Image (spheres, rainbow, N blue to C red):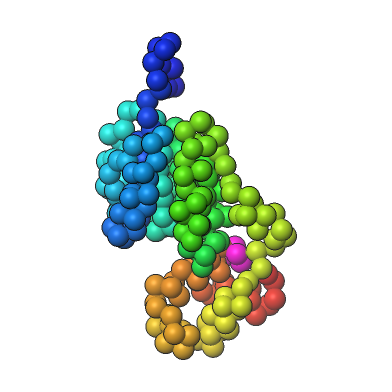
Amino acid sequence: MTKAPPQGEAPPVPQVIVADRQVIVCQGIGSLVAQIPEVELGAFATDKASLKKLLSAVHGPAILILGVRLADGDLTQVLGTVRKDHPHVMVVVVAEESEFAFIRSAIKQGANSVCMMGQILTSLPKILGKLVEGHSIVPTDILKRLTSETTDSLSRREHEILALLVDGLTNFQISARLGLSENTVKYYLKAIYQKLEVNSRGAAIAKYVAGNY
């Protein structure tokens, strides 16, 4: 349990660690964090080992800004480990619009806050300010999206990708057909699996064909 600072002494400034598989993303988020006086920018991590090392070295309050994928693991794996090994670290998950399914997953796994990458300039400073005060927060626009969706309905693009899966196309063939990168196709598939509550292509195809989604 973290000790309260002596009376009259300012509480320690939380250190912010940024973790994402792309260094350029870490640097972009880091440049924004560096302008926020309530926190102190720490180091960056691009894989699970470097993140574990950084978190283990933190002795005061810490905030982890976590992308949906590191070089060797996705959000589900990484957030689960952080919550187990470092329960006092506050976690903010950032995601692109196409990765919204990860936002649901992050909240279910106990993330303290979430932020869409397209709104990071305005949302992240407010989020960090609330976390410094000890409050978890889900931005209003994201909360509305989560509560207005009674089911994890598939998007038009996800329907397109599933239909191509049913036709037997590989990730490479799907990417060529739709003009997407293979990594983007993988992100969509991950979101589809989460929405359909399956963990394989075969199970996703079976559920989709049967209309049980």
Residue lying at 54% horizontally and 80% vertically, measured from the top left: 161
Quarter of the image where one finds residue 135:
top right
As displayed, is residue 110 above or below residue 197?
above
Q: Is residue 75 visible?
A: no
Q: Is residue 196 visible?
A: yes
As displayed, is residue 160 above or below residue 125?
below
Q: Nearer the viewer, residue 39 or 155?
A: 39
As displayed, is residue 90 above or below residue 180?
above
Residue lying at 44% horizontally and 22% vertically, measured from the top left: 1
Please say whether residue 197 is one of the residues in the magenta stretch: yes
As displayed, is residue 173 above or below residue 57?
below
Across and down, in percent, residue 73 comes to: 37, 57
Across and down, in percent, residue 22 comes to: 31, 60
Q: Quadrant of the C terminus?
A: bottom right
Please say whether residue 12 is one of the residues in the magenta stretch: no
Could you tell whether 185 is left or right of 153 in the image? left
Q: Nearer the viewer, residue 43 or 1?
A: 43
Q: Nearer the viewer, residue 136 or 186?
A: 136
Q: Nearer the viewer, residue 176 or 168?
A: 176
Magenta stretch bounds: 195-199
Residue lying at 70% horizontally and 61% vertically, measured from the top left: 149
Dominant secondary-structure state across the stretch colored magenta: loop
